[in-house]
Image (spheres, rainbow, N blue to C red):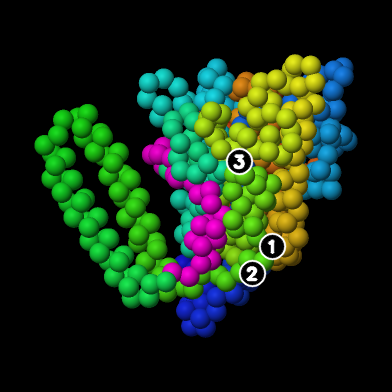
Amino acid sequence: MNMKKHTRRHFLRATGITLGLPWLEAFADSASAKTPPKRFCAIYFPYGVSLPGEKHEHATWNWFPFQTGRDYQFNESLKSLEPLRSQLSILSGLHHPRMAGGGGHDSGDTFLTAAALRGGGLKNSISLDQVMAKQLGGETRFSSLALSTDGGVGIPTRSNTLSYSDDGQPIPSLNRPAFIFERLFGLNKDSIEAQRRGFAVTGSHLDLLLDEARTLNAKLGKADQEKLDQYLTSVRQVEQQVQRSADWLDVPKPKVNANGLTLDADDNTPKELIRTMLDLLVLAFQTDSTRFATYQLASMHGATSIAVKFSQLLGFGNTTHALAHGWNKPGGAEKLGKWDQWQAENLAYFLGKLAAVKEGNGTLLDNTVVLYGSSNSNTHNNINYPLVLAGGKDMGLKHGEHRRFDNTVPLSNLYLTLLHRMGMEQKTFADSKGEMTELVG
């Protein structure tokens, strides 16, 4: 067993302490005694941003700064990020080439996968967070955390999650703050022994199911074998989750103060809902409950996403989908820009909270990479993604600039760079061509 994980678990079991313990040097091995863990979080919003030209009457509502380099000026949409300038980069020109010509609503599923989600199969691939979690997620209670406003998985091309397993299957997202808090920090009412018996019974049932499936598989045709194999992949994932839960059964969950959290927030209180979800992400990282997380602020399914009404509830005059469609109509650039501004203020809130938590010789933000953005530029164009990359200073990332990339540079180059910053020896990711050395200092 990994010594770092063993030491932490042994300490918690022996003392019975259930405080919200942060990462501690005492739990690190000698080789990394002063190195806090590395983390990653992706936050996604749909439908793109307002992009009026420099000579437009509402030019100051262009999401991107007009200048590049270190002396750029934030326009109105991102002004709330000014205090964090030295800890973030604005990235323009990047996209996933495989989705450039796809449907305007189809690209959200591939934000973290870069897959070619087109054609009859609609086959996705593993998401960036899950590549990290698969190799590095074994030291925490939860290998990863998938959150969204809508919850579940949605449907192909209208996904409600950013996270996909190694065989391209969507990982269900959580969307109710009270449930998420209970899962991260709550107490199970059953006794430890009762839970252990339950895990044992579940494991036995899964074993029987897998044995029966192996027998059945030999009698099926190729098409049915493929369907059964896909189903069994899901069963094996459940089996792994059961084993993981059993392994952590004797370790008390962190006990944190819920004061200030609006755990009953829902889709009728969008500001409270989003801020509470962001607070929970901070707590999950701070207590080392997980190191890899995704948060989808809304799905691309404008007709059914509960988040489509948020802009109306907050006084922006129309649904988010309608604001996106009307950005280039009279007055539309400013209207959508103000919605962009409100969303960026939530990002600033999140980054500020991460930066306020001291950790090692720096902060939680210094050891956490945050990727914020959309898979559309304006309305539903799948190019020039609006992206903010923040944090990760102690992981070697260099910030403080607006960097504009040639449109031949795939976004996957950034993903490969982040994998390397995590310490992973990854040669490629999806359609990557190489590392973005300009982001590393």
**Which comes sooner in the sequence, label 3 or label 2?**
2
Labels in figure, total: 3
Q: Mark 3: few, some, or many residues within 10 Å (few <14, many ≥20)?
A: many
Q: Tell me where residue 127 appears, x and y as whole percent.
A: 50, 40
Which amino acid type corresponds to the residue marked 3 in the rendered image? Leu
Element class at badge 3: loop
Left or right of residue 27: residue 402: right
**In the picture provided, is 411 more to the left or to the right than 403?**
left
- Which residue corresponds to mark 3? 297
| Residue type, mark 2 in image | Asn
Predominant SS along the magenta part:
loop
Q: Is residue 81 left or right of residue 432?
A: right
Distance Cα–Cα, label 2 vs label 1 = 8 Å
Q: In this view, does 249 lie above or below 283?
A: below
Q: Do the residues labelled 2 and 1 touch (CB within 8 Å)?
A: yes
Q: Which of marks 1 and 3 is nearer the N terminus?
A: 1
Provide the residue span drawn in magenta. 166-188
Q: Estimate the spatial distance between the alpha carbons at disc 3 and disc 2, rounded to whole Å.
A: 25 Å
Q: Name the residue under label 1.
A: 260
Residue type indicated by callout 1:
Gly
The answer to whether the residue labelled 1 contacts the one labelled 3, judged by CB atoms less than 8 Å apart, is: no
Q: Mark 2 points at which residue?
A: 257
Residue 171 falls within the magenta-colored stretch:
yes
